[in-house]
Image (tube, helix red, strand yellow):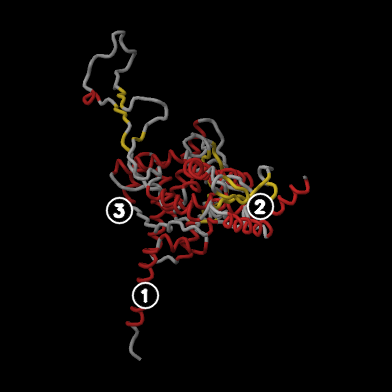
Amino acid sequence: MAKKSSEQRAEGMIRRRGKSFQAIVYAGIDPVTGKQLYLRGTSPDERGAERLLRKFLVEVAKQRHARTRASLRTTIESWLATNELEASTRENYVWLIAKHIDPVLGDQPIGKVTAYILERFYGELRRCSSRCNGRPFVEHRIDEPHECRTVRHKRPPGRPPKAGYPPHDCVEKGCLVIECEPHVCEPLGAATVRKVHFVVRGSLAAAMRWGWITSNPAELARIPRLPVSDPDPPTPAEAAVLVAAARAEDPSWGALVWVVMVTGLRRAELLALKWTDVDFESATLHVRRNHVRVAGRNVEKDTKTHRARRLAIDETTVRVLREHRQRYEERCRDFGVKPSSSAYLFSYSPTNDRPCDPSGVTHRYGRMCARLEIDSHLHALRHYTATELLSAGVDLRTVAGRLGHGGGGATTLRVYTAWVENSDRRAAQVVSDRVRHQPDS
């Protein structure tokens, strides 16, 4: 009996199920679950089942079948556990997985994930991040049962009287009305969909390396085009207003805005600067680390390109930083603390022993722009630096080096194409003018 069972297992079998026929072939032990793995297929007639049986036997013999029924969720978890990622990158991936991938494809066996399934998934995200499929519904504020419209009354200070608050006009008093609203489709951005695809592609590539699947369907799936970069830097007039307003608000805040504007540093690079990174004698800044917050913790890591760089700074910036250093030393004397070369340049702490909160800096700058009625944001100052340098005729490689772009300027060229073209046009005019003004021989 055991011998007959072994022969059936090696050759597969066909069995009748109702009005159809099912082909079954043993495919070994699932390396993930440890359970026996079978390939199964159903046909309305016995001849079709025989064709399926032969197909499965060839796949098993040549090891072309998926060797596990592990779900995409299990595969992604295994990929995250074995992949070395920056803390901030890992946090971003975990959010994308929980928000978009897992609810839709988490239970799907990786052997059944196809390019079509992925392209359809990406297309749904591009139409609506909630994948509503055009069905109207209400966006509830909370998941628990609740009243869809509540009023948070504007109450006077102090304890409420025993008789309760007197009747009042909510509009006049400015009471806050909170209500659930009809859903409005918000397409997921192309860049975010590409990040979702990268997670899926990376996890399936790992599954292929591990021998769980024989091909990676994500390599075939089409993804949205990379959006064309459209930097919108402030104008020189707006930049002057921003610097003046920041200095008037607080000299240290003005120094921060000035340094970002003239160096084009990333926010994380700026906040990681310490006094040891400033060389007043040679007028240089040494950019060698990033400061970010991950899951409520301060984290310092390498720069985005994992390379340190030195930036030359002009006399005005040296003077701004010297004055900023003097203010820091004065605060230390007031608190009876010795100034430290390892202190941060920009901090809300009196002794600069910890850097500014990244989100706090961004929000403060945003509030300042709103007050000045200038439509801008902190990262736009980086664009301002790049566009001003390129408009002034500084070569692409130098600009890329100052910004910390990798790829020998390829990133700079992709983001600031319009300004590079303007610079190139002026260069052509310079050559033309020189030739035209040569004396006749």
Residue with the mark numbered 3 = 237
Q: Is residue 258 visible?
A: yes
- Which amino acid is tagged 3? Ala
Q: Is residue 385 left or right of residue 29?
A: left
Sort mark 2 into few (<14), some (14-19) or many (20+) by Cα contacts within 10 Å. few
* Local secondary structure at mark 2: loop
Residue toward you, 313 or 306: 306
Sort mark 1 into few (<14), some (14-19) or many (20+) by Cα contacts within 10 Å. few
Residue with the mark numbered 1 = 428
Circles 3 and 2: CB atoms closer than 8 Å: no
- Residue 216 drawn at (x, y percent): 57, 56
Residue with the mark numbered 2 = 210
- Spot the residue most to the bottom: 441
Q: Quadrant of residue 388?
A: bottom left
Residue toward you, 358 or 352: 358
Sort mark 3 into few (<14), some (14-19) or many (20+) by Cα contacts within 10 Å. few
